[in-house]
Image (cartoon, rainbow, N blue to C red):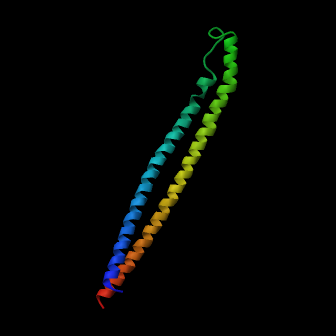
């Protein structure tokens, strides 16, 4: 194989390695940002669970809150607020967290594939370097 052809192939492989490294770095940055978001959502979920007592059992006594409005409020709190709270805390936040974790797994897989592709290209580059040395000495 001619030296010129080997040099061209080596140049292409260098460019591919550069592009793969760029993509991998982008995915790693995405993963880092995603891990921060996951952490934030988990904190929000914990905070949301901790404040449950404030809406579930506000300090309303018979002397501060009585009559028809108090009964209507209690009914609303038992039916509407509890259902809304459950929907946000258990369904929406868990769905968001599930989606984020699934995306994290996808990013990790993409990074692994890119790392494998980079290694493959590095082996190819080494083979081309050996071919180039052999061509130069013949």
Residue 59 vertical position relative to residue 34 in the rendered view, above or below = above
Q: Residue at x 57, y 43 (%)?
A: 96
* Pick the front one: 40 or 100: 100
Q: Residue furthest top?
A: 63
> Where is 65 relative to 129, above or below?
above
Q: Position of residue 79 (x, y in %)?
A: 70, 25
Residue 123 place in picture, x, y as percent: 41, 75
Q: Residue furthest bottom?
A: 138
The image quadrant where one finds the N terminus is bottom left
Query: Foreground residue, 76 or 42?
Result: 76
Q: Position of residue 73 (x, y in %)?
A: 66, 17
Examine the rendered structure and indicate whether residue 88 appears above or below residue 38. above
Relative to 5, say whether 38 is above or below. Answer: above
Q: Quadrant of residue 70?
A: top right
* Horizontal relation, residue 83 to residue 30: left or right: right
Residue 34, x across and y down, in percent: 48, 48
Dividing the picture into quarters, in which one does residue 138 lie?
bottom left
The residue sitting at 32% across, 78% down in the picture is 7
Q: How many marks?
A: 0
Question: Seen in the image, is 108 located left or right of residue 13?
Answer: right
Front residue of 51 and 119: 119
Residue positioned 69% across, 16% down in the render? 72
Q: Quadrant of residue 45?
A: top right
């Amino acid at each position: 194989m001619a030296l010129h052809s080997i040099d061209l192939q080596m140049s292409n492989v260098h460019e591919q390695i550069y592009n793969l490294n760029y993509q991998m770095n982008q995915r790693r940055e995405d993963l880092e940002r995603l891990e921060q978001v996951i952490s934030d959502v988990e904190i929000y979920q914990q905070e949301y669970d901790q404040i449950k007592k404030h809406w579930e059992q506000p300090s309303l006594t018979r002397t501060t809150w009585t009559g028809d409005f108090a009964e209507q409020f209690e009914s609303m709190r038992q039916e509407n607020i509890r259902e809304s709270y459950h929907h946000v805390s258990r369904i929406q936040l868990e769905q968001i967290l599930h989606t984020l974790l699934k995306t994290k797994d996808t990013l990790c897989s993409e990074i692994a594939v890119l790392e494998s592709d980079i290694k493959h290209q590095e082996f190819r580059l080494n083979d081309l370097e050996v071919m180039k040395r052999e061509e130069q000495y013949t």
